Amino acid sequence: MDSLFSLEYLIQQLNTKPIAGNTRSSIEKFLEILDKPKINLNELKKLSNLGVPDDIKGLRSLVWKLLLGYLPVDRTKWNSTIRTNIEIYEQFCNDLIKSKLQKQMTESNEYEDQENKQNKNQDHPLNKSQQSIWKSFFDDQVIWEEVEKDTVRTRAELSFFVSPTQIPNKYPVYFRTQCRRERRLAKDYEHRHYDVLTRILFIYAKLNPAIRYVQGMNELLAPLYYVFYSDTNELFLQSVESDAFFCFTIFMADAKDSFLRALDDSQDGIKSKMNNLNTLLRIHEIEIWDNLQKQGIHPQFYSLRWIMLYLTQEFELHGVFILWDSILSHSNKNEYLLFLCLSIIKELKPSLLLDDFTDIMEGLQQVGKIQVEKILQIVSQIYQHN
């Protein structure tokens, strides 16, 4: 029988850090739930909905993995789950990056050796056949560069994502992207956090060709990766990248429809979600709704980014963590997200009742100034749990 996953790394922090009384009490409640052989997920959701304390490193990381369903409720299975998923992810990287690139480089060398022999059957960089290693390489390079253009700018207000990472670089990349050319010229050979984001999103795109990569997905991955990298548990530090990949994949099961242009006009598409928010606004705040209609301010003017990116771009990262504690605590994340957006609008009410289009739009740009705790207070009063 597998042994229980140890929580000693969390308990030790609680016993050695000076932590305020209310926060200490909250952490103790989390540890009481997590210290059971089988986790009561409903109790964990109720507690997490109020926010996960930041004072204990690794607590939020563990809670999010449970809320997403990545870790099973049976605590004896955590170690094996993590180690199995490390192996699966490494196999993805080997199949989709390492071995393919090694084969391409071998083919390249063979081509150069035989070029003078005019071997017409040899694969070469201009070969457009679907079976060509070179064509596959260049197609992958396009995807990698699309992803990298965004990951290098992820949360630009922070230095974290452009900083070197302690995660080993097991998969050297031979793609000749603009970013990589500039880094070579600058003799920058560091393995940086955005390199890890790029690899995760590239693997996701390759495994999900119907979705591939769409701009903004990096902003959904960023909170997960940042939280997991901030963990202190030895096993979790080994699995940061694989954990982030699988948790992102789980999260995208709820988020992906907003990124699929083919679904824009469907009931699950982004247009439908914006219309649903508009309907909620008409029901709960007819005065605001009526004024926005008169001023010609349509939902897509302000809510497209809110909904697609789960409010990640409206608040500083710490505020996003608190909101996501609550979002991940709900089974119907998309529905709950709309009520969070409605709560933001309610809080902005005075500025949304003005008579000038420009003034109202400026008011809608002030979302980041709202305390996230206030948003959660409002949503708790209007959201009906299913």
Image: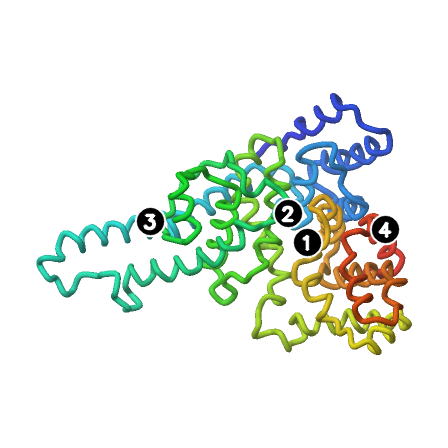
Circle nearer the N terminus (4, 1): 1
Q: In the rendered image, which residue does mark 4 sit on?
A: 374
Given the image, on which type of amino acid does mark 3 rest? Ser
Q: Residues within 10 Å of mark 2 (few under 14, many from 20)?
A: many
Circle nearer the N terminus (1, 2): 2
Q: Residue at x 81, y 63 (%)?
A: 342
Circle nearer the N terminus (1, 3): 3
Circle nearer the N terminus (4, 3): 3
Q: CA distance from mark 1 to mark 3?
A: 35 Å
Residue 215: which numbered mark, if any?
none
Q: CA distance from mark 2 to mark 3?
A: 30 Å
Give whichever of 180, 274 is nearer the camera.
180
Q: Quadrant of residue 349?
A: bottom right
**Which-is-in-front pick, marks 4 and 3?**
4
Kindly indicate whether the residue at mark 2 contacts the one at mark 1 (C-beta within 8 angstroms).
yes
Q: In the rendered image, which residue does mark 3 sit on?
A: 99
Q: Residues within 10 Å of mark 3 (few under 14, many from 20)?
A: some
Q: CA distance from mark 1 to mark 2?
A: 8 Å
**Which-is-in-front pick, marks 1 and 3?**
1
Circle nearer the N terminus (2, 3): 3
Q: Residues within 10 Å of mark 4 (few under 14, many from 20)?
A: few
Q: CA distance from mark 4 to mark 1?
A: 17 Å
